[in-house]
Image (spheres, rainbow, N blue to C red):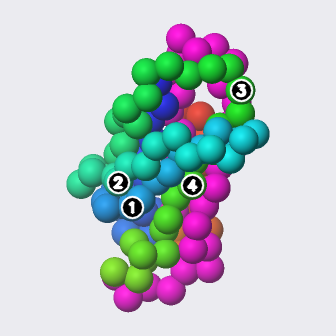
Amino acid sequence: MISTHILDTNLGKPAADVEVKLFHAETHELLATATTNPDGRVGNFGIKDFAKGAYQLEFEIAPYFSSQQVKTFFPRVCIQFFIEDINQHYHIPLLISPFAYSTYRGS
């Protein structure tokens, strides 16, 4: 399973209503689209079978900042990662601010 969570470090709160797309990184095939909930989370993209390989999450953060009348230097964040073990849960958190972002492998 793949999940994600977005925190707005500028405001110290979750980033709700952010569109997140999941792609197969090698083929660029769009696998799923989701929107973060009020807690800034996408708990599941609804895909049951994953294969070992490279994937990419694409976060559309410009509309999120625009809704707050805040300019951002990074309108979209793309994070590629590799699924080695299809039986594990892969949680990819994203920390955003108008002029920076960071990520890590979560649990």
Name the residue that disc number 3 marks: 53
Answer left or right for 103 relative to 32: right
Q: Is residue 17 above or below residue 79?
A: below
Q: Are marks 1 and 2 in contact (CB under 8 Å)?
A: yes
Kindly report the distance in space between the C-alpha atoms of the residues bearing marks 1 and 2: 5 Å
* Mark 2 vs 4, N-terminal side: 2
* Mark 3 vs 1, N-terminal side: 1
**SS under mark 1:** loop
> In this orientation, which residue lies closer to the viewer: 94 or 79?
79
Q: Residues within 10 Å of mark 3 (few under 14, many from 20)?
A: some
Name the residue that disc number 4 marks: 58
Q: Residues within 10 Å of mark 4 (few under 14, many from 20)?
A: some
Residue numbers of the magenta segment: 68-96
Q: What mark, if any, has residue 35 been given in the picture?
A: 2
Pinpoint residue 41: horizontal percent, then vertical percent. 35, 45
**SS under mark 3:** strand
Q: Residues within 10 Å of mark 2 (few under 14, many from 20)?
A: some
Name the residue that disc number 1 marks: 18
Answer left or right for 48 relative to 23: left
Kindly report the distance in space between the C-alpha atoms of the residues bearing marks 3 and 4: 17 Å
Residue type beneath disc 1? Val
Q: Are marks 3 and 4 in contact (CB under 8 Å)?
A: no
Residue type beneath disc 3? Gly
Pinpoint residue 51: horizontal percent, then vertical percent. 63, 20
